[in-house]
Image (spheres, grey):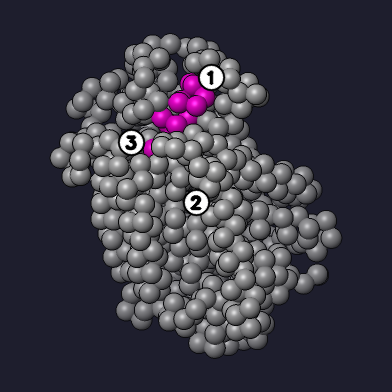
C-alpha cells in the first residue's frame, strides 16, 4: 500500500463495501496523481458503462445483415469464437483493473506495462479510435429510425449517397446530445446510461422470448446453412466465414470502459474486474440468443432482406409492425446510451493523457470543472471531432463498413499494446497482480498468450484488404482496398513521430494534478518486485 494521499478517510461508501476513499485512491498515488474526480458510481453504474459500450442491441441490429450477407446464417458461430478470444483479453484486463483502476485505463495500463512510449502510442491509438467509434455508432440511427418512420429520412430516399447524408445528419444530432450530457457531469451521464441499459436489457430478454414463441425451425438447420457462400473463395467457406466474423468482432469490445471510470467508482479494485467480466458474459449470452432465435424465427430463412435490411426486418416481419416498432425504439435507446458510454470513455482517456502533459494544451484538457466535476473541454473536443469525421464522409455510401472497420482495428491494436508488454512482464517474472485482488494465478501465462495471439490474428483479419469491406461500391482502387493499413499507418506513425520529436520532451504529471505524497514521474515501466 502506498502512502496516504492526505485526504480524510471516508468511513463507508454507498456500495456497502466499507472501503474508504483513501483506499480507493491508493492506485492514483502509485501513478503519481491526486484524486480529482468525484466518486459517485456504484456497482451497477460500472457494469452499465461496460455493457452499454458493447451495446448488444446496437451491435446486433447494426451488423446482422453483414454477417448473413457474407457467411449465411452459419455466421452465428463467429459469435462464440469472438467471445472466447475477447474473454482472454478481458481476463488480463481484470488483473490490471484490480491493480490500476484509473481513468484512461488502456493508456495507463500500457504505460505501466511497456513504459511511457508504448503507453503514449496505446493511448493515442485508443483515443483516435474512440472518436472514430463515436461517429460509427452514431451512424446506427440511420439503420433504425427510418425503419420506424419514413419521416426520419430527411435527405433523399434512403439509398446510395442520400442514406449516408441522412446518417450524418442523425448522427450529428446524437453526438451533440452526448456532448451536452457528458459535459454536465458523470452523475447525469450515469443516470441516463443506467436507465438506458435497464431498458436495453429488458428489451433484449423480451425479444428473445418473443422470437422463441415464433420459432419455425431448429438450430441444426440455422447453424449449418451457408447459402453456398465461399464456393469461389480460395479458402472455401472458411474464407467467407472470416469475412462474416467481422460482424461479431465489431460488437464485443469496449468492456474496459468499466475500469476507465475507476476514479469515479466506489471500491474500484473489487468492482471494476467484476463489471468487465459481467458486461462481456452478459453481452455474449443475450446477444447470442437474439441472433440464434432470430434466425430460427424468421418466416423465410432465404429472404433477401436478411442480408440487406438485417435484424430490423426480422423483428418487423416476425412480430408485426406494432410490437416490432416498440423493440426498434428500444434499439434507438440502446444506440443513444452506447454513444454516451463511448464518449465518456474517450473523455477519461483524453483527460488521463492530458494530465501527463502528453497532449497539446494538456493543462486545459485536464482541467476538471469545479461545478460539474468532470473534464468539460475533452467532452467538447471529442464531440466536435466526431461530427467532423461524419461530415467529411457525408457523400460516401460505404461510410458504415469503412469507418466501423478502421475504428475497431485501432482498438484491437491498442489492446495488443497492453497485453503484449504484459506478457513480456510475465515471462520475465516481473508482473504481480494486486494483493488480495483479482488474479489468474497459474493460468495467467496461457491466458495472456492466447490474448496476444487472438488480438494479432483478429487485427489482421479486420484489416485484410477485402473489396466487400473497403471498396464495396464504385470503381476499385488499391488505396481503398488497403485503406485500413494506410489510415492506421498514418495515424500511428504520424502520431508517434509527433510524440517522439515534440511531446515526449514535455511529458510529466502536471503540477496541479500531481499527488501530494508521491513524486513518481508519469512514465516508466513497472518496476520489478
Q: Residue at x 49, y 21 (%)?
A: 72
The total number of labels drawn is 3
Is 221 above or below relative to 66? above
Q: Quadrant of the C terminus?
A: bottom right
Q: Residue at x 46, y 45 (%)?
A: 402
The residue mark sitting in front, 1 or 3, is 1
Is 144 above or below relative to 376? above
Q: Would you name the residue on which mark 2 appears?
A: 407
Boundaries of the magenta span: 62-73
Residue 517 is situated, as x and y percent measured from the top left of the image, at: 62, 86
Q: CA distance from mark 2 to mark 3?
A: 27 Å
Q: Tell me the crowding category of disc 1: few under 14, some 14 to 19, or many 20 or more residues within 10 angstroms, Cα based.
A: some
The residue mark sitting in front, 1 or 2, is 1
Residue 494 is situated, as x and y percent measured from the top left of the image, at: 58, 66
Q: Would you name the residue on which mark 1 appears?
A: 229
Q: Give the secondary structure at mark 3.
A: helix
Is 108 above or below relative to 201? below
Q: Give the secondary structure at mark 1.
A: loop
Inspect this view and state whether residue 35 appears: no
Q: State yes or no: discs 1 and 2 in contact (Cβ < 8 Å).
A: no
Inspect this view and state whether residue 312 appears: yes
Q: Residue at x 48, y 69 (%)?
A: 350
Residue farthest to the right, as pictured: 428
Residue 127 colored magenta?
no
Residue placed most toward the observer, 56 or 361: 361
Q: State yes or no: discs 1 and 3 in contact (Cβ < 8 Å).
A: no
The residue mark sitting in front, 2 or 3, is 2
Is 30 on the left-hand or right-hand side of 20? Answer: right
Q: Would you name the residue on which mark 3 appears?
A: 203
Labels 1 and 2: the sequence-earlier one: 1
Q: CA distance from mark 1 to mark 3?
A: 33 Å
Q: Quadrant of the N terminus?
A: bottom right
Amino acid at each position: 500500500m502506498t502512502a496516504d494521499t492526505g485526504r480524510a478517510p471516508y468511513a463507508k461508501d454507498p456500495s456497502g463495501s466499507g472501503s474508504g476513499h483513501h483506499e480507493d485512491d491508493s492506485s492514483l498515488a502509485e501513478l503519481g496523481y491526486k484524486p480529482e474526480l468525484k466518486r459517485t458510481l456504484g456497482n451497477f453504474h460500472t457494469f452499465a458503462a461496460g455493457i452499454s459500450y458493447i451495446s448488444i442491441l446496437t451491435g446486433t441490429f447494426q451488423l446482422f445483415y453483414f454477417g448473413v450477407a457474407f457467411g449465411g446464417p452459419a455466421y452465428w458461430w463467429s459469435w462464440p469464437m469472438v467471445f472466447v478470444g475477447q474473454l482472454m483479453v478481458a481476463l488480463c484486463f481484470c488483473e490490471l483493473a484490480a491493480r490500476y483502476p484509473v481513468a484512461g485505463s488502456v493508456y495507463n495500463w500500457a504505460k505501466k506495462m511497456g513504459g511511457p512510449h508504448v503507453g503514449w502510442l496505446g493511448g493515442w491509438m485508443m483515443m483516435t479510435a474512440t472518436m472514430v467509434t463515436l461517429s460509427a455508432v452514431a451512424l446506427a440511427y440511420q439503420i433504425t429510425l427510418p425503419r420506424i418512420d419514413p419521416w426520419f429520412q430527411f435527405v433523399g430516399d434512403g439509398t446510395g449517397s442520400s442514406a449516408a447524408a441522412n446518417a450524418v445528419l442523425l448522427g450529428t444530432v446524437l453526438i451533440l446530445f452526448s456532448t451536452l450530457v457528458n459535459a454536465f457531469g458523470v452523475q447525469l451521464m450515469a443516470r441516463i446510461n443506467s436507465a438506458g441499459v435497464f431498458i436495453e436489457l429488458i428489451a433484449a430478454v423480451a425479444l428473445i422470448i418473443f422470437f422463441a414463441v415464433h420459432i419455425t425451425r431448429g438450430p441444426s438447420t440455422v447453424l449449418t446453412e451457408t447459402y453456398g457462400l465461399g464456393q469461389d473463395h480460395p479458402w472455401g467457406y472458411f474464407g467467407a466465414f472470416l469475412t462474416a466474423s467481422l460482424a461479431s468482432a465489431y460488437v464485443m469490445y469496449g468492456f474496459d470502459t468499466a475500469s476507465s471510470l475507476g476514479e469515479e467508482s466506489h471500491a474500484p479494485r473489487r468492482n471494476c474486474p467484476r463489471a468487465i467480466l459481467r458486461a462481456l458474459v452478459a453481452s455474449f449470452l443475450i446477444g447470442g440468443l437474439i441472433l440464434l432465435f432470430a434466425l430460427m424465427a424468421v418466416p423465410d430463412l432465404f429472404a433477401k432482406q436478411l442480408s440487406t435490411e438485417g435484424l430490423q426486418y426480422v423483428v418487423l416481419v416476425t412480430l408485426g409492425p406494432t410490437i416490432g416498432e416498440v423493440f426498434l425504439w428500444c434499439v434507438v435507446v440502446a444506440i443513444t446510451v452506447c454513444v454516451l458510454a463511448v464518449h465518456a470513455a474517450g473523455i477519461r482517456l483524453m483527460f488521463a493523457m492530458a494530465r501527463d502533459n502528453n497532449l497539446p494544451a494538456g493543462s486545459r484538457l485536464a482541467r476538471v470543472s469545479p461545478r460539474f466535476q468532470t473534464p468539460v473541454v475533452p467532452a467538447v473536443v471529442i464531440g466536435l471531432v466526431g461530427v467532423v469525421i461524419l461530415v467529411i464522409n457525408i457523400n460516401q455510401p460505404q461510410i458504415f463498413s469503412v469507418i466501423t472497420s478502421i475504428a475497431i482495428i485501432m482498438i484491437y491494436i491498442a489492446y495488443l499494446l497492453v497485453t503484449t508488454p504484459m506478457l513480456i512482464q510475465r515471462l520475465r517474472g516481473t508482473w504481480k497482480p494486486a494483493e488480495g485482488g483479482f488474479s489468474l494465478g497459474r493460468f495467467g501465462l496461457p491466458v495472456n498468450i492466447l490474448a496476444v495471439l487472438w488480438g494479432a490474428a483478429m487485427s489482421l483479419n479486420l484489416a485484410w484488404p477485402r473489396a466487400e469491406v473497403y471498396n464495396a461500391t464504385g470503381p476499385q482502387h488499391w488505396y481503398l482496398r488497403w485503406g485500413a493499413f494506410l489510415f492506421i499507418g498514418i495515424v500511428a506513425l504520424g502520431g508517434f513521430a509527433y510524440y517522439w520529436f515534440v511531446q515526449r520532451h514535455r511529458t510529466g504529471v502536471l503540477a496541479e494534478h500531481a499527488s501530494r505524497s508521491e513524486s513518481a514521474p508519469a512514465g516508466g515501466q513497472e518496476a520489478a518486485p
